[in-house]
Amino acid sequence: MDETTVIATIFGMTLVTCVPRIAPMVALASRTLPEPVVRWLSYVPTAVLSAMLFPSLLLSDGAFDFSAGNFFLWASIPAILLAWRTKSFFGTVALGMGLVALGRYLFA
């Protein structure tokens, strides 16, 4: 690849990354959103995180894996319950990591 193509690619990638993020901020900077919209938007991070997380918990090599060897799935159950109950991000991550480490230590 020549230098012009690399620079054009970097510029294009910057543009398609920054414009969708900056445009809503500029368009909505002086407006107040209605309460139902704000409430609906509060669920977006949870929905996105779930969409990214659940396939890695449930699938192994393109098939559902509910075996005892799927430490990530079994560690996620108490971690999800802790997150729901306490709303503690740090505690949830620490519990999940600890349970996966314990499972690998004891069973792998």
Image (cartoon, rainbow, N blue to C red):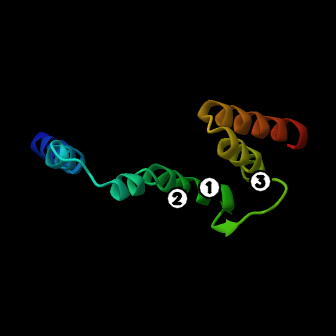
Image quarter of residue 10: top left
Which of disc 3 and disc 1 is earlier in sequence? 1
State the CA–CA distance, disc 2 to disc 1. 10 Å
- The residue at which mark 2 appears reads as 51
Nearer to the camera, 29 or 13: 29
Identity, as a three-letter code, of the amino acid under mark 1 = Ser
Q: Are marks 1 and 3 in contact (CB under 8 Å)?
A: no
Which of disc 2 and disc 3 is earlier in sequence? 2
Q: Are marks 3 and 2 in contact (CB under 8 Å)?
A: no
Q: Find residue 5 and report its horizontal and vertical position in percent.
A: 13, 47
| Quadrant (top left, top right, bottom left, bottom right) of the C terminus | top right
State the CA–CA distance, disc 1 to disc 3. 10 Å
Q: Find residue 87 and report its horizontal and vertical position in percent.
A: 62, 39
Residue 56, numbered circle: 1
Question: Of helix, strand and loop, which one carries label 3?
Answer: loop
Q: Residue extending furthest left?
A: 4
- The residue at which mark 3 appears reads as 70
Q: Is residue 1 visible?
A: no
